[in-house]
Image (spheres, helix red, strand yellow):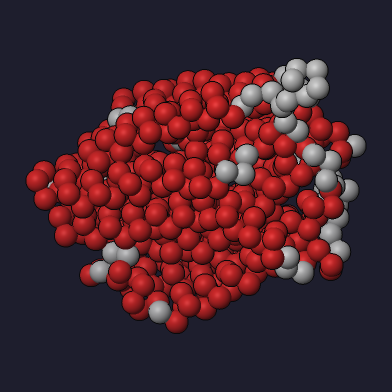
Amino acid sequence: MSKVSSVELGTKPIGKLLVKQAVPASIGILVMSLNILVDTIFVGNWIGSTAIAAINVVLPVSFFIAALGMSIGIGGSSIISRALGANNEVKALKVFGNQITLTVLLTVVMVIFGLVYANDIIPAFGGQGAIFEPAKTYYKIVLYGVPVLALGMMGNTVIRAEGKPKFAMYAMMIPSVANLILDYVFIIVLDYGMAGAAWATTGSYLFLFLFIIWFFLSKHSELKLDLSHLGLNRRIVSEISSLGFVTLARQAVVSVTYLFMNNILFDLGGETSVTAYAIVGRMLMFALFPVFGVTQGFLPIAGYNYGAQNYDRVKETIYTAIKYAAGLATLVFILLMVFPESITRLFTSDPEVLKQTPSAMRWVFAATPIIALQLIGAAYFQAVGKATPALLLTLTRQGFFFIPLILILPHFYGEIGVWVSFPIADVLSTIVTGYFLRREIKKNLLPPITENNS
């Protein structure tokens, strides 16, 4: 029964298959994003607008450590998808075992480092002035749960690689619902303030981890591990690392972006500007959930069919994913251009934040309709195991364009220079990705040579 699910990736019509993969992924991302959104609303309304800025300071650090698990998960899952497509279950099992061992080792080391140097890391990421103390409270508690989150995120990508999108969706929904309930208990009922928000988040990570363990021990998973699979294999670790480094590099650049943004905005407008960016950042996570869902749904389909050398299906998957994602991105764009003021009021009643945020939101999302090409293009190279172009295209937007722009434009245009950097980076990175994806399709996605067509 479980075998049929992964085989379907190479046989079902692409449109229906992409919907089947993308809808659960979108719902999972939606619930997870809603969780972050409502968490911010809880904090902003019951603790204060400075608390929103404090969480925004902590997120890049905790997300980077958790991204170790996601990067190991996505890198390994690309290998697993292609191994299942080639009927090599032995390799799939060994890769999964190595993913678990790597995730545990790396995240525990990073958490220890993060706790030891907490007083240096928090100010570096913009935790200055009134933001420092609440940020430190939140940071230390959340960091305890990050290894569990990393294992959960890693396991979730493997579930998707097996062709089980509904269970991957459940894995994202469970901690989100748990966090909302725990937020209410710890923040409102028990009045624990920032510590309550942090314990709610950490508790939700544990629920995710428990679900992941249940899935792989149940009959639903076709990957049944034993202790021999956990021993590290140099070749497999190298392959996981080369592909996973794409995701890790992306998150590293995101963390560096937060570092620059929080410090630049603090210098230009103080806590108010950092809070405005925190609200816009939440909308970047939330509003684009259907586009990210299509991207997540695209990965196992492209990887499986590439492994099976079914290149016509790979090309069809690329075109269909771009079409679906672009349509959804356009709808998001329209909503955010029309209702930025109403959205901002959900988070805070601070008049200064209400004045600044809507304009910033419009600039940040100005190029949203075209980002589908950039996301799907970069995801394609990762799905098929081409680590170098995947890495370069993933870094294009924020690493090669956005960070230089936010370091240059504010000197000439002040705070508006920060916000206009977003659409400029989107346009430039989309052009670059479109060029390389088109070249890849024309050169390499040709039918394999056989005796009949040679």
Q: Position of residue 345 (x, y in %)?
A: 31, 41
222 relative position to 192: left or right: right
Nearer-the-camera pick, 451 or 354: 451
344 relative position to 115: left or right: left
Nearer-the-camera pick, 439 or 244: 439
- In the rendered image of this protein, does residue 348 appear above or below residue 135? above
Q: Residue at x 66, y 41 (%)?
A: 169
71 relative position to 258: left or right: right
Q: Position of residue 6 (x, y in %)?
A: 79, 36
Nearer-the-camera pick, 80 or 139: 80
The quadrant holding residue 8 is top right
- In the rendered image of this protein, does residue 325 appear above or below residue 375? above
The quadrant holding residue 343 is top left
- In the rendered image of this protein, does residue 412 appear above or below residue 371? below
Q: Residue at x 52, y 73 (%)?
A: 111
Q: Residue at x 52, y 78 (%)?
A: 112
Visible in this render: residue 173? no
Q: Position of residue 224 (x, y in %)?
A: 86, 55
Q: Position of residue 425 (x, y in %)?
A: 30, 38
